[in-house]
């Protein structure tokens, strides 16, 4: 299997989605989401702009936009593209792409910041896993490769998502860093390789570099994730990882975590009531809420009866009471109350127990353990006195309902 940054990202985000997409290659009619569609239209247009520049042909902004609009019209259809976010139309997304292109064009015209030496350029990377004695093959595509000077190359990626990454984020981004391994091998004379992201929505260009050590570390991390994938393949273990990304997942109509949501979203109000799954979930919710309401009502009553039983048994010096069908044993225990977590007293008590090597005996300050140890004379009297400064003795009553 040939890996890619995108397949590894898919595995990280949701192993089940990885299985559908790359192992089973599930054949279902997949719709592109409109964000991805708009992104690909913008990418195609920029590719056209730079391809023409290679032939000394500089497109005007109008020609660039015409190309974009025509590509959009030729490729868009609601059978193939879906809008996930409510309240936005095809036109909204289309004009967003136009804005990105206008902004980019006006900022970088006449596009002489470097010489384009690759467009949508395929790169191949081989990583050798010494431990498993295997070579993993990776493939990637660089949006544009630009030769800035004789020994300086920029690896360029256009981003059309809403938000730009921060410098800290691009400094740890893996995709372009991986591609730089292949570029260094292909152009060994190049001394400086910059990783560049054009965040078209914000009109920002972010640049980052990697040292030899950074790349060695990245190779190792990549090998580790591929090993994880290989292990999952061997065990056929690809758990679903539901998240906010599910709404953009092409396999949600067959995924056990989302399929029912897809079905019910397409039902009208009346049909809702007839759908068995919806009915069962609603019933379960109804009974769970009823149960909670009953418990909320009955728990305080039980406490009141318990208090009355304890008073009655004490007043009459009785330890066992009898009802019509059952008997009830009333037991009083003495116990030691541990100071609240994170309180000063608690910290001092912990320190005292640790200093005197009693910590392993008190099971993380279980009041039952401590009470038993004190009652059984485990601590010598001078240490017990020190302990009792922190422990408040209290009485606990318990009721045991039995057969008569
Ligand atoms: S819908 Fe969510 S959980 Fe299911 S495969 Fe897609 S991303 Fe994974």
Image: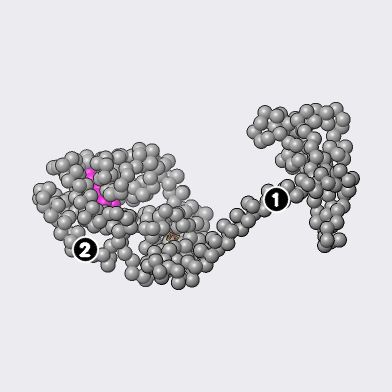
Q: Which residue does the numbered mark 2 point to in the structure image?
A: 75
Q: Position of residue 40 (x, y in %)?
A: 25, 56
Q: Is residue 250 found left or right of 313 in the rendered image?
A: left
Residue 271, which numbered label? none
In the rendered image, which quarter contains the C terminus? bottom right
Q: Position of residue 349 (x, y in %)?
A: 73, 31
Residue 52 lies within the magenta run: no
**Residue at 72% from the left image edge and 40% from the top image edge:** 364
Q: Main secondary structure of the magenta part?
A: strand
Question: Which residue is nearer to you in this view: 202 or 273?
Answer: 273
Residue 144 lies within the magenta run: yes
N-terminal-most mark, 1 or 2: 2
In the rendered image, which quarter contains the N terminus? bottom left
On the question of residue 256 being in view, the answer is: yes
Q: Secondary structure at mark 1?
A: helix
| Label 2 beta carbon less than 8 Å to ligand 1 | no
On the question of residue 234 being in view, the answer is: no
Please tell me whether residue 254 is drawn above or below residue 302 in the rendered image: below
Q: Position of residue 237 (x, y in %)?
A: 52, 63
**Segment tinted magenta in the rendering:** 141-147
Q: Position of residue 104 (x, y in %)?
A: 20, 44
Please tell me whether residue 316 is drawn above or below residue 259 in the rendered image: above
Q: Secondary structure at mark 2?
A: helix
Question: Which residue is nearer to you in this view: 386 or 289?
Answer: 289
**Residue at 32% from the left image edge and 44% from the top image edge:** 163
Q: CA distance from mark 1 to mark 2?
A: 68 Å
Question: Which residue is nearer to you in this view: 275 or 41?
Answer: 275
Q: Which residue does the numbered mark 1 point to in the structure image?
A: 301
For disc 2, the neighbor class at 10 Å (few under 14, some 14 to 19, many from 20) is few
């Amino acid at each position: 299997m040939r890996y890619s940054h995108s397949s590894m990202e898919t595995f990280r985000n949701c192993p089940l989605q990885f299985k559908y997409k790359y192992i089973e290659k599930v054949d279902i009619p997949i719709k592109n989401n409109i964000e991805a569609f708009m992104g690909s239209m913008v990418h195609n247009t920029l590719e056209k702009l730079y391809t023409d520049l290679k032939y000394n042909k500089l497109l005007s902004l109008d020609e660039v936009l015409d190309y974009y609009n025509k590509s959009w019209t030729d490729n868009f259809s609601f059978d193939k593209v879906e809008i996930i976010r409510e309240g936005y139309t095809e036109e909204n997304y289309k004009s967003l792409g136009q804005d990105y292109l206008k902004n980019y064009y006006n900022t970088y015209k006449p596009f002489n910041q470097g010489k384009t030496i690759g467009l949508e350029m395929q790169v191949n990377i081989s990583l050798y896993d010494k431990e498993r004695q295997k070579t993993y093959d990776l493939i990637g595509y660089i949006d544009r490769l630009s030769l800035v000077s004789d020994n300086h190359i920029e690896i360029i990626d256009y981003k059309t998502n809403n938000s730009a990454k921060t410098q800290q984020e691009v400094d740890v981004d893996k995709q372009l860093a991986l591609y730089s391994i292949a570029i260094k091998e292909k152009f060994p004379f190049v001394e400086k390789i910059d990783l560049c992201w054009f965040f078209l929505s914000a009109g920002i260009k972010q640049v980052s570099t990697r040292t030899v050590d950074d790349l060695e570390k990245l190779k190792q991390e990549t090998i580790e994730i591929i090993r994880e994938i290989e292990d999952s393949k061997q065990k056929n273990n690809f758990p679903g990882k539901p998240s906010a990304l599910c709404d953009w997942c092409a396999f949600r109509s067959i995924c056990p975590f989302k399929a029912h949501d897809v079905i019910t979203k397409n039902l009208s109000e009346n049909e809702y009531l007839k759908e068995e799954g919806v009915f069962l979930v609603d019933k379960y919710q109804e009974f769970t809420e009823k149960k909670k309401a009953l418990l909320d009502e009955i728990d305080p009553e039980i406490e009141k009866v318990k208090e009355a039983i304890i008073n009655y048994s004490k007043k009459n010096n009785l330890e066992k009471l009898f009802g019509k069908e059952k008997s009830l044993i009333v037991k009083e225990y003495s116990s030691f109350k541990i100071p609240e977590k994170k309180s000063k007293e608690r910290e001092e008590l912990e320190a005292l127990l640790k200093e005197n090597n009693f910590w392993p005996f008190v099971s993380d300050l279980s009041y039952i353990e401590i009470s038993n140890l004190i009652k059984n004379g485990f601590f010598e009297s001078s240490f017990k006195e020190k302990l009792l400064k922190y422990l408040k003795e209290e009485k606990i009553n318990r009721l045991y309902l039995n057969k008569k």
